[in-house]
Image: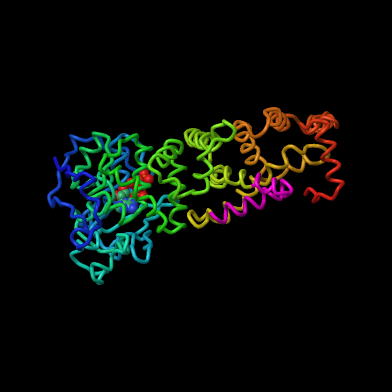
Amino acid sequence: MLLYAQPPFSQRKEQPTTLESKIGRVPTNTTPTVIPRAEHSISRALISENALKVLYRLRDAGYASFLVGGCVRDLMLGREPKDFDVVTNARPEEIRELFRNARLIGRRFRLAHIRYGRDIIEVATFRAAPHTGKEGEEGEEAEEDHRDETGRLLSDNVFGSQDEDAIRRDITVNALYYDISDFSVKDYVGGVADLRAGVLRTIGDPETRFREDPVRMLRVVRFAAKLGFKIDPATAAPLYDLGSLLLNVSNARLFEEVLKLFHGGYALETYELLRHYDLFRYLFPRTDESLEGEDGNFPRTLLPRALANTDQRIEEDKPVNPAFLFAAMLWEPVRLRAEELTAAGRHPREALMMAGEEVLRDGQRHVAIPKRFSFPMREIWELQSRFARRSGKNAFKLFENKRFRAAYDFLLLRVHAGEESQDLADWWTRFQEVDADGRAAMIAALAPETGEGRSPKRRRRRRKSRAGGAPPQA
Ligand code: ATP
Ligand code: MG
């Protein structure tokens, strides 16, 4: 067994001082455990044709040629891998010479992308963590310069040997290699035992590894939700305390990671784990705050329901949209802020716009939502104020809006959360089902006195106040 003993968390509290303790030494096994073909379940039939082409061509040219990472983990578990990553001892330039369809990408961490139509196989060269680099070819600086004062790794681009490549990876089950030369699996870090036990464990000292790259904390949680694995207690312990390190991660990278967290098919479970380990608030602080209290004894159900729906859609192979995800993610603070602004005298529609702008602006500091998603997200919010106004041309105009469907789905979430009446949702459901004449009839049938779900009294009051110079309704 190659499992590494982890000292109890309590013994590792003090900050690293010397370089050696900074590194959090990982024992390397330069000779891996080899699991022969007969003793594991990876069959070539489950590997993509293009990945096999790449593996064989590298092998035939005399290079080491392995599948690595998530695809080996997933294949061992009998799951379908998302993508196939290849690793080799060939240098990027050598890879390019071997494949006409190769493109080198990345400035610091150079990789080859081998393209087959829309399919891309990523081929990396064995890397070492900077401190263990033997060659230093691309990282000549002093070792200390590879980390900042929080322990974060600043560079990650030193070629290394296969065992070095294994230990720079994040968790043991992600560091297995499938060898195309004899179809065996090579394990330097006890990954196979952890895979069989269903355990997620960082390679080396957890706190050190999380400090090196705080996104690893999110990855551990993501894999726990996706694989249904347990997080080893020593790996889990520092999660509770290190969340604030996520504040040092670029908001663009966190956006990418958030999509992986919530569009991976296990959003609800992931969300619950993120809350459990107190990591969620470093991604969406205002949402986290708004979830603290309950609203008039209504538990806040909109976000969990939205996440469950997202999982359901992915399960059914339906498309999912980041704009909708973020609309749900940030809605609670938007709604609460809009209420405050309305109470302070703003017109409800203006309050909603202002609240949306403010919550988005605050949120961007943590997770940068690109405009192509934040624009439609705000439209989804803003359309919410238009569902109740159905008379005249209002309903038709709303129906023709290109965000209507997303806004309607969002309305259903709000109805479930008790924010709007079921009658209103039913009306809009029916409106979509009937033909144009049916729609006109539905609008005509809205009783003017009681139309739009308002009591006659409230409606009169509204008329009066509008006449009194309230802003026009767009
Ligand atoms: P997924 O199923 O999401 O693709 P994955 O494990 O393949 O999971 P990738 O992000 O594709 O995840 O990364 C491929 C491999 O690269 C990982 O399995 C891991 O070995 C290594 N890796 C990725 N991110 C990190 C990180 N932040 N720190 C260390 N190693 C990493
Ligand atoms: Mg992957």
- Does the magenta portion include 354? yes
Residue 83 seen in render = no
Residue 112 rendering spot, x and y as whole percentages: 34, 59
Question: Magenta span covers which residues?
Answer: 338-362
Residue 216 screen position, x and y as percent: 34, 50
The answer to whether residue 245 is left or right of residue 302 is: left
Q: Is residue 391 above or below residue 141?
A: above
Which residue occupies the foreground of this view, 31 or 261? Answer: 261
Quadrant, the N terminus? top left
Quarter occupied by residue 390: top right
x and y percentages locating residue 347 in the rendered image:
74, 48
Q: Is residue 361 magenta?
A: yes
Relative depth, front residue between 430 and 71: 430
Main SS class of the magenta portion in the image: helix
Residue 313 screen position, x and y as percent: 51, 35
Residue in the picture at 82% in, 36% down = 459
Q: Is residue 404 visible?
A: yes
Q: Residue at x 27, y 35 (%)?
A: 198
How many discs mark residues in the rendered view? 0
Residue farthest toward the front in the current orientation of the protein: 344
